[in-house]
Amino acid sequence: MGFVAASRQVRSIAPDIAPDLSLPPQPTPPPVTDVQPLPSTLPAGSVVTPLGWQQRNDGVVSAVPTNDGVELILLQTGQEERVPIPVHSPMPALRIDATITATTDSAGNELGVACMTADHVYGARFTINANGDRFMWLYGPDGTSELNEIRSGVIHDVTDANQLSGVCIEHGQQFEMMYAINGAVVADVVVPQLTSAPLYPALYICSCFGHEATDNSAISVSSLPTGTGT
């Protein structure tokens, strides 16, 4: 399972032109938020019973089964991990639901749910962070592409419970991703087909900006008929 160390470059830019002080000060624009959820609902399907979680500690990530899910702890900073949700077999169309609470958090770290192929090359992830931002990312052989980022009013504090739902659907020559946060559908994106390989569900956690640990409960995976969605 691959890990990506995050790095940021901060540039200090000194102005070389004196500002025009005759211009009136410009008001600070309000933060961008979700005005309302999309007028659609996530498709439902046949619930797939996850297999039992196994305790894991490979020096990078620790997974500890709990009564209603699993606790994930990244043991190193600058890492990201898609932890497979144990199911019997992959699916061409699936929905992942999980209630995620950050027990240790560093602002900027993303946490959420994901779908991925067995080789971890293709897939998507649906995440939030402590700044109140939501993200949707696409995985492919050329790396990771950000499809959607917005400040969202439907996100609770990450140290409180957030119910995240992600849908990945392969149908025809298209790949559809739908995303809901605390019951509100916030994104529905269709891109050209990624791959014909079926997908596995996963939980996502990163320590890109510092230590991170999450409690993940009410985890549910549903197999969807292909052709659902748009």
Image (spheres, helix red, strand yellow):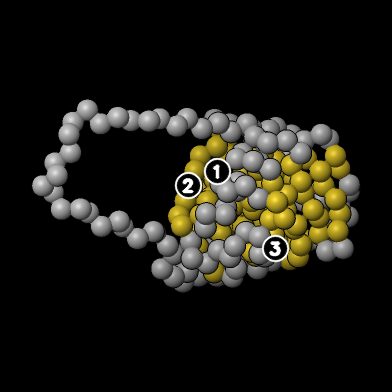
The answer to whether 63 is drawn above or below residue 27 in the figure is above
Instruction: Please give the residue where the numbered disc 2 appears in the rendered image.
Output: 147
Q: Residues within 10 Å of mark 3 (few under 14, many from 20)?
A: many
Mark 2 in CB contact with mark 3 (< 8 angstroms): no
Q: Amino acid at mark 2?
A: Leu
* CA–CA distance in space, label 2 to label 1: 7 Å
Direction from residue 50 to residue 77 in the image, left or right = left
Q: Residue at x 75, y 57 (%)?
A: 215
Residue 191 circle label: none
Instruction: Please give the residue where the numbered disc 1 appears in the rendered image.
Output: 138
Which is nearer the eye, 83 or 62? Answer: 62
Tell which circle, 2 or 3, labels the residue nearer the N-terminal end. 3
Q: Amino acid at mark 1?
A: Leu
Tell which circle, 2 or 1, labels the residue nearer the N-terminal end. 1
Q: Residue at x 76, y 65 (%)?
A: 218
Instruction: Please give the residue where the numbered disc 3 appears in the rendered image.
Output: 99
- Image position, residue 46 (x, y; %): 73, 66
> Which dot, 1 or 3, sits closer to the camera?
3
SS at circle 2:
strand
Q: Residue at x 68, y 43 (%)?
A: 211
